[in-house]
Image: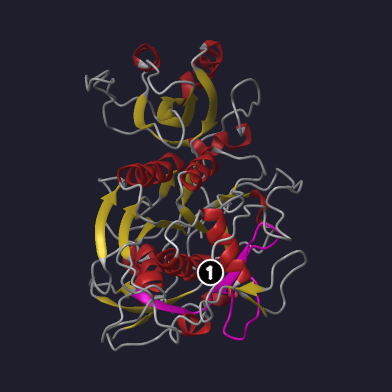
């Protein structure tokens, strides 16, 4: 599949009918590999069908050992393969491994799982995989796929007059006073946000520092969830919630999955440091992996949920069953599909039993910025835009019931929703999130929601590979 990567500054000229395309909010698929890597599936290697999507040009940066000592002073090779390695213990000694194979270390993980992300010259891949098979400290190995994204499809409204977006009206957030949200944290794992019209509490950046530019996707998402109630721009579903920007999407080209996992790792560390604060994470990104089996990103998201962080994820914009979409198919995440102003299910929205709830996702007005960098308002479409409506509802619920578990939040939002959306595909919920009426208090039951298929996967053809970020 041809990938089209354009500079962000072209955004100002785009006036696209985004609701009519599967591309929706403009984020898309994996980078094409510079060259084929022979697929293999044996032993500790998982998701071998994605190895080609883990190949990229070699970094010019020198690799380092665990003490910060340089291992080499020249570029590793013409191209490298990214790998995510799961280890049995948090203190795996990788020095000899790094030195032997000239590995470039990207991240180490302690909270999502024990492991590390590395890059290896393509010519060393076979030898490295064979060696990892022999190491008792290694549990599994996966390709660190690169997910690419195009410029966002946005229609700009260059003014700062206050507006209540139709989606906020539709879910009842405009007519129902919001609770005090100052003690609830919302983590937006995305492309970054700005301070205008948000109660921004922190910013953490995992993106490639060599890339210059900005992507409005995360800012738009954050505005829908949390824009302040004031006399400028828009109002969000949970105005005043403490927003934490976790910037993981590179502004151009592609983003390795390991980088997104590093963002989730950071959020879990925040939970450990602040165990009494209710937390919601919005993840409006993902990709079709061609398999229902969990990958490292899925494991990371589940680890966040196990740490009592309510995680809301976008279902995706390919118009397919979401059972092979990561991290939308994570069992305990709240997976969100989209509909339009006529309460019609959006044609681009992924569907199926793994979708827990629906929310407005077509022509959503929220925060963005123009070509000069000035904050303004803009329309975008996609399940990316639907998810923050649900994240806002989750934040409002946790403000009332701060001890609620992620499973209880999911159950309450579904129970308090309205089953009125039209045109949903077979085996897909008709329920939209709704905060106009008080959602039920947390239930002691943590059984799967009735009708959810998240614990009984479909068999979907593995030949359809990753093709979309949301």
- Quadrant of the image occupied by residue 161: bottom left
Mark 1 = which residue?
A: 24
**In this image, 274 relative to 151: left or right?**
left
Rendered residue at 52%/53% (across/down): 286
**In this image, 258 relative to 332: left or right?**
left
Tell me residue 86's x, y (percent): 49, 27
**Which element is circle 1 on?**
loop
**In this image, 99 relative to 343: left or right?**
left
Q: Which residues are magenta?
A: 338-367
> Along the line of sight, which residue is nearer the eye, 416 or 155?
416
Magenta stretch holds residue 350: yes
Tell me residue 56's x, y (percent): 44, 37
Tell me residue 442's x, y (percent): 55, 62
Rendered residue at 67%/78% (across/down): 421
User: Considering only vertical position in the picture, is 413 above or below 360?
Assistant: above
User: In this view of the protein, can residue 317 be seen by the observer?
Assistant: no
Magenta stretch: dominant secondary structure? loop
User: In this view of the protein, can residue 418 be seen by the observer?
Assistant: yes
Magenta stretch holds residue 140: no
């Amino acid at each position: 599949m041809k990938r089209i990567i354009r500079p962000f500054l072209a955004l100002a000229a785009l006036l696209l009918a985004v609701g009519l395309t599967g591309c929706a909010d403009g984020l898309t698929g994996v980078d094409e590999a510079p060259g084929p890597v022979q697929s293999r599936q044996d032993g500790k290697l998982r998701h071998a069908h994605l190895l080609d999507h883990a190949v990229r040009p070699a970094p010019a940066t020198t690799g380092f050992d665990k003490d910060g000592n340089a291992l080499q002073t020249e570029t590793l090779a013409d191209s490298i393969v990214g790998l995510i390695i799961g280890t049995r213990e948090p203190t795996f000694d990788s020095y000899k491994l790094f030195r032997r194979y000239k590995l470039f270390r990207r991240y180490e993980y302690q909270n999502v799982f024990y492991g590390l992300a590395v890059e290896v010259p393509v010519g060393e891949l076979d030898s490295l995989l064979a060696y990892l098979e022999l190491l008792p400290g290694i549990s599994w190995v996966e390709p660190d796929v690169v997910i690419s994204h195009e410029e966002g499809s946005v229609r700009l409204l260059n003014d700062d007059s206050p507006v209540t977006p139709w989606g906020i009206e539709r879910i009842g957030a405009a007519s129902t006073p919001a609770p005090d949200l100052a003690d609830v944290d919302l983590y937006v794992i995305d492309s970054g946000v700005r301070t205008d019209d948000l109660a921004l509490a922190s910013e953490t950046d995992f993106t490639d520092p060599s890339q210059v530019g900005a992507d409005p996707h995360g800012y738009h998402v954050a505005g829908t969830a949390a824009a302040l109630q004031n006399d400028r721009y828009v109002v969000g579903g949970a105005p005043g919630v403490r927003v934490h920007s976790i910037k993981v999407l590179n502004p151009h080209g592609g983003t390795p999955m390991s980088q997104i996992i590093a963002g989730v790792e950071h959020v879990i560390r925040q939970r450990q440091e602040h165990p009494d604060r209710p937390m919601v994470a919005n993840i409006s990104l993902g990709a079709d992996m061609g398999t229902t089996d969990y990958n490292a990103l899925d494991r990371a998201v589940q680890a966040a949920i196990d740490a009592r962080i309510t995680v809301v994820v976008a279902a995706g914009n390919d118009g397919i069953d979401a059972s092979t979409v990561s991290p939308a198919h994570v069992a305990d995440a709240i997976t969100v599909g989209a509909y339009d102003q006529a309460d019609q299910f959006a044609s681009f929205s992924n569907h199926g039993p793994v979708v827990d709830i629906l929310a407005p996702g077509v022509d959503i007005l929220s925060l963005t910025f123009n070509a000069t960098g000035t904050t303004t308002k803009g329309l975008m479409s996609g399940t990316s835009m639907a998810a923050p409506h649900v994240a806002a509802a989750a934040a409002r619920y946790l403000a009332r019931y701060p001890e609620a578990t992620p499973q209880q939040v999911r159950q309450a939002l579904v129970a308090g929703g309205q089953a009125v959306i039209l045109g949903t595909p077979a085996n897909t919920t008709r329920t939209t999130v709704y905060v106009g009426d008080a959602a039920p208090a947390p239930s002691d039951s943590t059984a799967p929601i009735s009708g959810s298929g998240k614990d009984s996967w479909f068999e979907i053809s593995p030949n359809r590979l990753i093709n979309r970020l949301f």
